[in-house]
Amino acid sequence: MTTTEHHTPTAAGSGSSASAAFRAAARTTQDVPPERVDTVARAVLRGVHQAIREHDVTYPEFQAAKQWLMDVGEGGEWPLFLDVFVEHVVEEVAARTQDGTKGSIQGPYYLPDQEKLPWQASLPMRPGEKGTPLVFAGQVRDVDGTPVAAAELDIWHADDDGYYSGFAPDIPDGNLRGVVVTDGQGRFEITTVRPAPYQIPTDGPTGKLIAAAGWHAWRPAHLHLMVRAPGYRTITTQLYFQGGEWLDSDVAEATKPELVLDPRPQEDGRLRATYDFVLERG
Ligand code: MBD
Ligand code: FE
């Protein structure tokens, strides 16, 4: 992680942390047959060739694009760029064969092996963690309605400034991250703070493209979740907040109407949001 003197997160800092996290994640490498590589690589190149022909792309523009692509790599922003602009379509294709709770993209800021917590727990947070206290409760069930005991809710989200622990300086490791284990009735009740919307760093190449194109750089406030239990297909999803800013114009196009929470003040003044997860066997 890169720390600057004034402790403001930098695009290069979060980019290199996201690249390192991606490389560290254990994943199975597939042997892709040449026919498949041929088909997909050809289709991707065809799309690029078409854009050049359709829009009379010039040599200076081609060289500017090359420079920009180099900058994305050097800034470690490929995980950010791909998860913001491409992952939602990969998820859309995966969703064609999924039942139960709707999925959404994982994004670049997941970290494995966080603290295991009982079904009723507070996420690790700093003393006096800034933000509106939020209680997030519900139940995990299978598609037949049977509660799933000892399911793991792996949850991570941004703080009240829109920053993620592990990807911004001065936030303790594990802050606002945890693996909550459901009780015998599949229940969970998690205390945390409401996250702020997330802005793509404006000082890196992804931010520069967004500014150059006149787009906005925002994702609506969201909770990230992975829900898993032995014998069930893991759900990776996100939950958003009713009425929240950017909900209708997420730069990552990762919202779904089924994934919006409607938090209400509890008797003690804290916000309470409920959501039940449905897992399919597999
Ligand atoms: C995020 O917080 C996020 O969830 C995604 C998908 C991309 C960039 C930042
Ligand atoms: Fe996120």
Image (tube, rainbow, N blue to C red):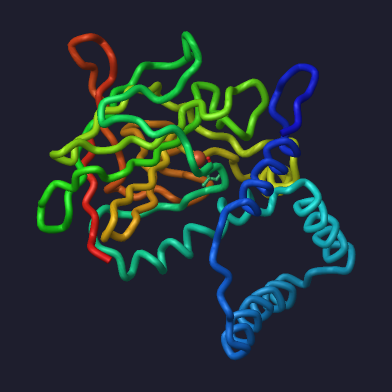
> Which residue does the image show at 11% across and 51% down from the upper left?
146
Answer left or right for 51 relative to 30.
right
Q: How many marks?
A: 0
Answer left or right for 32 relative to 65.
left
> Which residue does the image show at 77% across and 46% down from the upper left?
75
Q: Position of residue 241 (x, y in %)?
A: 34, 33
In the image, residue 130 sits, relative to residue 120, either above or below, namely above
Quadrant location of residue 184? top left
In the image, residue 225 sits, relative to residue 132, either above or below, namely below
> Which residue does the image show at 10% across and 52% down from the upper left?
145
> Which residue does the image show at 35% across and 22% down from the upper left?
122
Furthest residue to the bottom?
A: 35
If the image is split into quadrants, where does the N terminus sit? top right
Q: Position of residue 234 (x, y in %)?
A: 34, 56
Q: Position of residue 123 (x, y in %)?
A: 40, 25
* Nearer-the-camera pick, 195 or 152: 152
Q: Position of residue 57 (x, y in %)?
A: 79, 69
Answer left or right for 238 relative to 106.
left
If the image is split into quadrants, where does the C terminus sit? bottom left
